[in-house]
Every structure is written in C-alpha cells, then in structure tokens.
Image (cartoon, rainbow, N blue to C red):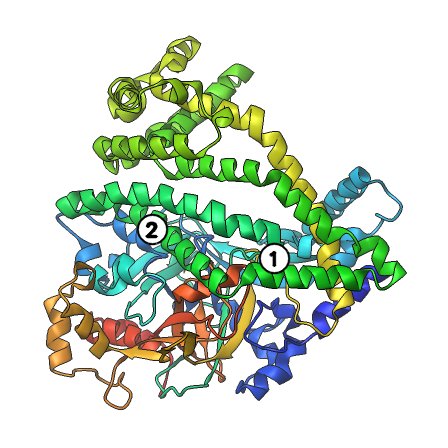
Amino acid sequence: MKKISFLLIFMILNVFSRAEEGMIIPTLLGAFESDMKAMGMKISAQDIYDANNASIKDAIMHFGGGCTSEIISEKGLLLTNHHCGFSQIYSHTTVENNIAKNGFWAKNLQEELTNPGLTATRMVRIEDVTAKILEGTEGLSAAEINQKIMANIALLKAEALDGTHFEAEIKPFDFGNSYFLLVKETFQDIRLVGTPPKTVGKFGGDTDNWVWPRHTGDFAVFRIYADAENKPAEYSENNQPYSPIHHLPISLKSREVNDFTMVFGFPGTTNQHTVSTELDFIINTLRPAQIQMRDLSLSVINAAMKKSEETEIMYASKQARIANAWKKWMGQIDGLKRGNAVSKKIDYEDNYTTEANSKEEWKTEYGNIVNELRALSTQFNKSDFTYNMYIEYAYVGAEIFKRARAIDQLMDLYKEGKTEEIAKIIQEQKESLNSFYEQYDINIDKDIFLLQSEYYKKTVDSAFLPATLLKSDLTSLQTNIFEKSFLVDQEKYLKVLNNFDKMAKKKINKDPGFAYYSELKQIFTDQLLGDLRMYYGTKDQLMKPYVKGKYEMYPEAKHWANANSTLRVTYGKLEGSTPRDGMKYTPHTTLDGVIEKYNTGHEDFDLEPRMIELYEAKNYGEYAQDGELWVCFTGSNHTTGGNSGSPVINGEGHLVGINFDRSWESTMSDYMFDASRCRNISVDIRYVLWMIDIYGEAPHLVKEMTIVR
C-alpha cells in the first residue's frame, strides 16, 4: 500500500517539462495550475473542475459515447463536430429533403429532430479510490486479488449511487496502478437543432482529412432535453430543454499567436507505453495491411457514391467511418518514421533496463520487464496481425458478415435452448431490418467481398484461412454466396426469422454466406482466441510494473495516464508548426483559403452559391478579425480520437473553438508525442457563429448564447 501511495504522489506532483504533452485527470489540475497560469490562464483549477460547485466540467458532455460536446446556452444548446453527428444528420436525410446537402436550422423547438439512442453524459464527479479498491488485497494470490478488487468495486459503486439517478463506473488507470470512481449523469433525449451543408461541414472531404491547412466548418448543433424536474428522461413530447449547471460563454475577441488554449474532453485511446518491438510491427507490418484492406473497400464505395445521389446518402456515414482511420494510419506511419520513433523507444528501454539494474530493489521488480515485453510482442505479433486482419475483413469490410453475426447470435442461443431470449432478439432484429437494408447495396457489398477476400487470402497465413477460401475460385465463391444466401435479401432474411425454429435445425447452417462466416469464426475461436487472451493478459500484467517503474525511477519526467475515454484536460497555445524541412504551418486559415480551394474545381471543395455571395460581399458581420474571417486554427494541445467536438477554451474560460482533428504528422501522438510537430486542429467559434447567424439565417440561436465581445 505504501508503494501505491508513493506512485500516486508522483502522479500528482510531477509537472511536464513541456506543458503541451499529456492528458490530465481533472482532479489533478491543482498541480499544474501555476504552469497553466504562466502560459496565460486567468481562471483557477477549481473553476475548471469542482465536484461540489458549478464549474466548466459541468458544460462538457460525452456525446454518443465516442465524441465530446459542450453546452453553450441556458437552454441546453449543444455544440459538437459535424462528423460526430454525421449518422444523425444522415438519418434525417432523404433525396426529397436532403438536409445533409442543403443544411438545416430549426426555427423553433418544435422543428428540432429526435435521435433515438443518442446520449449526452455529464461527469458529476471523479474520485481517486485506489486505496479503497486495493484494501484487503495484501498477501492474496492473483486470483484472490482480482476477486477482492471486484468486490470492492461493487461496494463502492453501490455507495456512490445510493439515493441518486446517476451512473457509476470505476476504471483502472496506468494498468491498475491506480483506480478512479466516475459518477455520471446520462441524458437520453438529444435533438438535432442545426447543421451546415456538407460543403461546409465536410469541406475538403478525404483530400483534406488529417491535413493542414484546413478549412472545414466541422460543427453541428444539438439540444439536450430533460423531464419536468430537469432530470434525464427518454424522449417525450413533454420534455423541456435542459437547464445546465454551467454553460460556456463564447468569445468573439481577437486571437493572437501564443494565446493560452485548453481542450477539455473525452480522449479515447493512447498507447504511449508500447514497446519497440510492437511499435516496429505496427509501423511496418500491421498498419500497411489495414490501410490496404480499407483502400479496397473505399475504391468500391467511392466509385458508387459518385454515380448516384441516393447511394451517396446511403453510404456517406459508412464511407466516413472507414476513411477516417484509413487516412489517419497513413499519417501515423509517416510521423513515426520521420520521428525515428522505434529508435527512440529502443534507447529509452535500454536506459530503463540499465537504471532498473542500478539498485537491488529496482532490479527485482523492473530489471527484466523490457526484455519480457519485447519477447512477448515478438512471440505474438503473428497472432495479433491475423486478429486485426480478421476484424478488417469480417467487421469493417463486406456487410454481409454483419447479418451473419446477427444470425449467429440467435444460433448460439438456440443451442443453449434459450427460447425467451431468442424471441426477444428476433423481434429486435425485425424492427431494425428496414434501416439496414435501406442502406445496403448488394452490388457494392459483393465487390468489396471479392477484393478483400483476394487480399485476405494473400496476406493471412494459410493455417488461419477457411478451407472454403483456400480451395475456391474467388469469383465462384462470391457468386455462390451473393446469389444464394438469404443474408443479402430482406424478404428471405425475414422469412428465416419468422420460421427460425424450423430453419435453425438444418437450413441456416447450409446457407453459403452463413457457413462461410461460421468457418471464419471457428478459426478465430479455436486457433486465435487462446493466443490473444494469453498475449493481452500477459502484456497488461507486465505493463503494470513497467509503468510503475517509470514513475519511481524517473520522478522528474513527464508522466500521465493513457487516454481511456474519461474526462481529461490538455493545455497549450495557439501556434503553428514546422513539421519538416522547408515547410512551415501558419496557425490559422481564413475564408480566403476556402475560396482558393473552391477555385481549383476539385469535387471535395465544392461550395453552395450562398457562400460565394457572402464572400464577395465581405458580409462577415461582427465575426471578422482585421477584415478576415478565421475558419480554423492549430494549437499545441495533445488530443486523440474522442476529443472530436471538444471545446477549445481560452485563458478566461471562454469558448474560442471546437477541436475536430490533428494534422497528418500529429497522428503519431497516440504512440509518441513530438512537441515540434504535433498540433490539434479546431474550427474557430466565430466561423461557427457566422455560419449560424448570417449564412444559416438562424440568429435566434445566437441570441440564446452568452457572447463575450
């Protein structure tokens, strides 16, 4: 217990040598307050996070479980990224009422659009409960320790929720070296208020994704609704706009280079402790193969979307999901190679081992950890590669596998004789069939299947390939599956559901599409799953002392817990970068650049006529700075996936932008942060308000907001 307490002291007291790196747990902000103020922050750490009083954290919402959003009015108005609300926007889009293309602004509350299943979650409080979680674990075996921890977690969660409508979660940080209690409030009635046209919200498309200079108006507006007591509730016509504990004032003041910036949000995943052998495998083997798999899917989808507006609406959200990681990975590889990341990892690990062996008490606990982690990675890289390719093939690729998995779930229940659960899931599937098949094109799917099957067969070890794939001509396999399987036809699929007991006895297993998926799954279960459990389980066990050793042996170094979709703060400055020789990135872009890109004639830079008219008239209202309308800016804030939609907050605690991306060179920061090149990209809040007020002609929404001029 004393060692754990010692570790926590290091977590709290160590200040980064560079403030830009790291994602700080809000309860630890006090240790960074003086550094933040030296960089230009005027508010206090308590203004940012206070468990007992209104603070900025009460305006920060986890949007849909994967993005961040922020409350900007007393009536629950919510800002996030256009790409975070993409699926909701397209769910309300039809050829006849193409709000994705034309934009949409609700004129009143009655016009705001409901989004079943969408949530927004507020962090009520965060508490370090490490000592309580580990209480009573001394002297126990590994299995007994785990049981005791689970029991302690259950008890603490029950105590935290007693007499409330909140939710609670206890998460391990730093591979179990510490634990934090997260008490949350989740709202379930989130309505779409407005979106710019896709020529703004997705301006630049895949061409500009992960790229600077950037000119994307990546924002959308939602609203939180609550019941008569201002508490979360399922959708009801009687619900009212939520009255928040805090909402962010919006600054229209001029920006300057080196202004303090803070990003407050829910970053998803970082992997700063990945060892050299694994990182080398990721850079040179895994990522290139994943990129190629997605390249094949996108080649089919992109071509089909260009031919038909209906297909574009059907596949826009799917295309965006596939393309986002595809391009990110390319930049990630480039950044890690340019930064000599593997060599730097090797140097650090060798130094770590030398340091560990310099003291007897360190030698026992940390002396051989690096060698063990390297050996483990080398041993299981092949299994990890096969698993990730299986995910790309059977989960990200052809959608026929999605329907196969749905049937497979029913078949598993059938084998267990769980008739009541089968009936429930069949009903759920019936209710969702229309939405799936309305967004499904068999010709697109069959082409993706063929291209990916060819590459999968070529790159995956034959020991992990289905016999059907090994022995079949791929064109014949494609034809047999897509012409005969019920999985690709809604009527036939519904017939199977309606006669499931009868079909489950023989016919389903004989279906060529389901039979092929079953082969894939069987290989995963029988040949891969055991290795993966061994690999990931052992790696976590070794990572715990490895990370603990970093805190203990390098107390003056910068330390922070990997992102894990919990609320974090990162701070830096509004600044550009010099990512490579001969190239310098300025810190902001303007509407002039939007027009310049439009004039290239590239389809990713299309604009609606209204944008040209307003630009030529220089109708910028009160949102310009020195005659220019800023569109985007970069900052030295350490961000990752999940920070999309996060507010960018200035030194006064006012909203100045919405984070939505990183530069291509910055995507390496999931594994290694380079302060000279890693920059987050945000849309300037003045451009957002200009789009709402002047372009979108929805000034009533701006009137809701607290504007700081």
Q: How far apart are marks 1 and 2 (CA)?
A: 34 Å
Q: Where residue 150 sits in the image (x, y, percent)?
A: 73, 43
Instruction: Tell me the SS state at disc 1.
Output: strand
Write down the quadrant of residue 585 in the picture.
bottom left
In this rendering, the answer to whether 279 lies above or below 630 is above
In this rendering, the answer to whether 226 lies above or below 508 is below
Left or right: 249 as drawn, with respect to 181 = left
Q: Which residue is drawn at 51% across and 39% down?
A: 385
Residue 586 or residue 642, whichever sits in front: 586
Left or right: 384 as drawn, with respect to 684 = right
Query: Which numbered marker is on residue 183?
Result: 1
In this rendering, the answer to whether 690 lies above or below 533 is below
Write down the quadrant of residue 601 in the picture.
bottom left
Earlier-in-chain disc, 1 versus 2: 1
The three-letter code of the residue at mark 1 reads: Val
The three-letter code of the residue at mark 2 reads: Ala
Residue 328 or residue 637, whichever sits in front: 328
Numbered label tally: 2
Which residue position is annotated with label 2?
323
Instruction: Tell me the SS state at disc 2.
Output: helix
In this rendering, the answer to whether 687 lies above or below 508 is below
Q: Is residue 1 something one can see in this rendering?
A: no
Left or right: 349 as drawn, with respect to 524 = right
Left or right: 229 as drawn, with respect to 308 = right
Q: Where residue 292 sits in the image (x, y, percent)?
A: 36, 44
Q: Which residue is drawn at 36% across and 37% down?
A: 397
Question: Neighbour class for label 1 at 10 Å: few (<14), some, many (≥20)?
Answer: some
Q: Where residue 356 sits in the image (x, y, percent)?
A: 80, 61
